[in-house]
């Protein structure tokens, strides 16, 4: 049966909750007195529809129904979950809870998105304090899994369990916080960094941009996959966490932060941390943790390389610099039309390896697609040409997989133009690792108008250059496997 | 001409430097008195060879030559760059610098990996202090781009510029630190989090594992791509950074951290931060920053989804849960052999979109490859079967691209078994978005022995199940485009 969430307050956080519930198949009712709330929410929902359904590899349930009842009572009546995300003023929250609790079901959960207040503060003065808890999410709520769940001793443990199950069912990762402390866990860590960062700016040591780079080019990448303690466990090497603490503990006495009030690193704390770290990571050796870290980092860095943001910009700069020495021609004038054109020279990324231990099937087409892109650029269909409204779309592909290849191995592609006239570009790629032939690919592409999305004649520059290459390559011996259908005998 | 780096101290950091220089085409000489240093370095190099060459999309220069001269003088003589990564004891470093500087070139750079000491401290007592600077990297040095470059007023500015250019040429992102402060920039931020985290553990609020989850399921993901201030700029909405500071500034007075000594958020600091943030991010609107953030986050999360670590485990759990309702059969017994088998039901991920604004070519094969994997699982070639030593490898593929598709749109694949006997599995996939046919794919796979990497006969279970499906699907009308070669007339 479709469940219903009531969203009270539809700012960035409330709207993010609405999108997450809705796209996970819940019906969602929204209450926010701001006349702009609805259009703002629709913007968030539009962004979420692009990002969330394709986050995993399996379809989400059909989207629920979104309504704006206009009255608090109608919004919360019969709802399974009520999420409050109003401004951070305790009197305002307590007052709204009276209105919410007078209409909502006794068995429903009333969760607050508060980053600062504890459940006990929120529950004060409520006739049914037990149904109130904290479910503190992180922006963008429709993408980030973390939600801190905090209860007081007036909350029934089974309600906390039920809340966590429910949040898990909408793709989140509930972190049950053991104690009621101001700002829960994550925001305490954030606040510490924030305070230190403010000092750095105030003292003129760094600008905001430099501080962001100090994070996103370094430890931010590590933290996206492991967090603080597991990263430090690796730094401690086979000596483990206690070794690390022994090595870096003294820094607590050094002026490495403007923030003081430092806990004493006594035996008790060392043992506690070492035991917790063993419980967390102890089943994996340091070598295994390192391999896991590297594979994650390569995946993250390459994802950023695709968008060109943060560390991805560093990858793109390196690629541009390395291209000149790679043997791949950068201008049409550099090509010898009497030989196949080297269109790719690279290595197999660590994140292209599959459960069979070799480069996975789809990455063969990835490399061939990049080879096609390079040939497009060489004949004049470059970034500016695409921006001006024309491009090539592949309409047909035939691949023969001949041999396998492992992470880090070199890859080259040699490309021939079989035909290039009218609206067509017909290409032949051979993929090698050293002198070992890994695969061949035959592609038919159509030149397209990006406005009409229909095929259009090659422009003269492209037609001329393709003709030069097609003529040159026609003199080469016919490639083995050309014009082959799947299952043909060689 | 090949340049030479001298690595003094080959622990985890020194070995990481050696690998980064070597794989970027430098000759590398290593000095470390520890008899285990060489074998440890070779382990780091092995890991780096898997990860670094494939990090970008273009080949790195040919690997340089690695030597272990055995004497400091031979190690540094003629080297362009000397990188010191010995233990963090100032007297030790100063003493070693005397030995290094008596043999190294006057024009070479002597860089220290120190996380704590300032250049002025390192330079004290040196006859040529100007050639000493800090180049502080982050583990793993062969993957993370960040390197903090710190000079004193005794360092020539052109040497700092040259150092930064050189570090850029080996794929790093040098961050020139404006002032000499203990722990530079990044480690001050890390130290603040570390101290707060120690309080959380000591106070029993959270375990090490919970703290790591509070990071890697939430803000760690944001920080991998944007850092602190740009993330908060988005949180401020169109009101910008000043609005954010107005909204969250008061938290500085709240007990949100055990760390005290808080800077005053006066007008001067607000204006400074707002101006620096404008300079950093001001050319992009909040909507653009949000779109950029979402695209990065989806890429990062999906990369982790592939490895299953951190937030990627949350994605995998959600997929497993959603699979049951997706219409994709989970057991062979659930299949109706009289109809094509639904092998994929998903949405187009945001990070699968290319410069043409639609799902990029290689992702068609990604989806078809996943459809093949699902069919393999259904007929019995599941994870356990692969772990036991047998699998299928694709040997031939033909794809017809019929229509394009955008981010977030639904995708389904309907699969038929054309043949399944001997050593072969011959499949036909049709990819739809709703009822719109996007592409077809024909695949020939061979059953293989993962030890010999050669084809082997189907096991009876697989052969029986494939026969049931092939018989059922033979009664369906022949698919359009079957057995087609590239360029055949329809």
Image (tube, coloured by chain):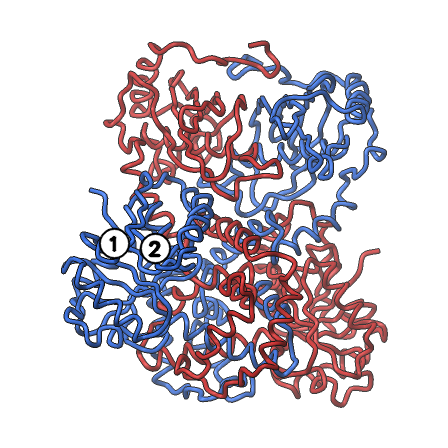
Chain colours: A red, B blue
Which of the two discs, 2 and 1, sits closer to the camera? 1
Q: Chain of mark 2?
A: B
Give the residue at x 61% y 48%: A54
Q: Is residue B221 visible?
A: no
Q: Residue at x 34, y 41 (%)?
A: B60
Residue B54: image location, x then y, percent: 43, 42
- Is residue A144 found left or right of B227 in the rendered image? right
Chain of residue at mark 1? B
Q: Give the side of residue B330 with respect to residue A420, left or right.
A: right
- Residue name at image x 21 percent, y 57 percent: B73
Residue marked by disc 1: B75
Q: Same chain for the residues at labels 2 and 1, yes or no?
A: yes
Toward which corner of the image does residue A322 lie, by quadrant?
top left
Label 2 to label 1: alpha-carbon separation: 24 Å
Quarter of the picture containing the C terminus of chain B is top right
Residue B367 found in image quarter: top right
Asked if residue A477 can be seen in this view, the reply is yes
Query: What percent of the width, then of the height, locates residue A36?
Result: 58, 68
The residue tagged 2 is B172
The answer to whether marks 2 and 1 mark residues whose Cβ atoms lie closer than 8 Å is: no
Left or right, B25 with reference to B239: left
**Is residue B411 shown above or below A335?**
below
- Residue A119 at x, y percent in the picture: 71, 82
In the depicted view, which residue is nearer to us: A384 or B251? B251
Of callouts 2 and 1, the N-terminal one: 1
Question: Is residue B179 shown above or below B348?
Answer: below
Task: Name the one closer to the observer, B241 or B419.
Answer: B419
- Which part of the image, by quadrant, shows the N terminus of chain B? top left
Q: How many marks?
A: 2
- Near mark 2 (Cα within 10 A), the count class, few <14, some 14-19 or many ≥20, is many
What residue appears at the point 53 percent right and 43 percent down from the top-left corner? Answer: B352
């Amino acid at each position: 049966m479709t469940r219903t969430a009531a969203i009270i307050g539809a700012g960035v956080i409330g709207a993010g909750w609405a999108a997450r519930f809705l796209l996970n198949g819940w019906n969602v009712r929204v209450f926010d007195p701001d006349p702009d709330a609805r259009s703002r929410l629709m913007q968030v929902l539009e962004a979420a529809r692009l990002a969330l359904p394709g986050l995993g590899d399996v379809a989400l349930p059909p989207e629920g129904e979104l309504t704006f009842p206009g009255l608090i009572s109608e919004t919360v009546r019969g709802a399974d979950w009520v999420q409050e995300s109003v401004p951070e003023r305790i009197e305002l929250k307590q007052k709204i809870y009276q209105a919410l609790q007078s209409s909502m079901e006794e068995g429903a959960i009333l969760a607050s998105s508060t980053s600062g207040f504890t459940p006990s503060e929120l529950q004060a003065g409520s006739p049914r304090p037990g149904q109130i808890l904290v479910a503190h999410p992180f922006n963008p709520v429709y993408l980030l899994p973390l939600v801190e769940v905090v209860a007081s001793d007036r909350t029934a443990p089974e309600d906390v369990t039920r809340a966590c199950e429910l949040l898990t069912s909408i793709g989140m990762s509930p972190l049950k916080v053991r104690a009621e402390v101001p700002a829960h866990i994550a925001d305490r860590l954030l606040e510490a960094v924030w305070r230190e960062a403010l000092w750095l700016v105030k003292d003129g040591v760094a600008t905001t941009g430099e501080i962001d780079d100090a994070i996103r080019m370094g430890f931010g990448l590590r933290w996206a996959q492991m967090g603080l303690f597991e990263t430090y466990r690796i730094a401690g090497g086979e000596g483990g966490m206690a070794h690390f603490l022994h090595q870096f503990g003294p820094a607590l006495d050094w002026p490495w932060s403007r923030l003081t009030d430092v806990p004493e690193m006594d035996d008790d704390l060392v043992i506690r941390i070492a035991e917790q770290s063993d419980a967390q990571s102890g089943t994996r050796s340091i070598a295994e943790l390192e391999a896991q870290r590297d594979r994650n980092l390569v995946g993250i860095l390459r994802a950023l390389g695709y968008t060109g943001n943060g560390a991805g910009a560093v990858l793109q700069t390196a690629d541009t610099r390395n291209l000149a020495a790679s043997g791949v021609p950068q201008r049409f004038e550099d090509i010898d039309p009497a030989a196949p054109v080297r269109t790719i020279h690279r290595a197999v990324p660590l994140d292209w390896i599959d459960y069979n231990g070799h480069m996975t099937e789809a990455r063969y087409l990835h490399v061939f697609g990049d080879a096609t892109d390079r040939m497009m650029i060489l004949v004049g269909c470059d970034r500016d040409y695409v921006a001006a409204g024309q491009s090539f779309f592949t309409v047909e592909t035939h691949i023969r997989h001949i041999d396998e290849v492992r992470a880090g191995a070199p890859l080259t592609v040699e490309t021939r133009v079989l035909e290039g006239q009218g609206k067509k570009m017909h290409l032949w790629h051979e993929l090698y690792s050293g002198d070992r032939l890994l695969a061949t690919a035959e592609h038919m592409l159509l030149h397209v108008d990006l406005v009409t999305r229909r095929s259009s004649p090659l422009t003269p520059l492209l037609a001329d250059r393709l003709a030069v290459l097609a003529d040159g390559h026609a003199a080469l011996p016919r490639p083995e496997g050309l014009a082959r259908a799947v299952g043909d005998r060689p």
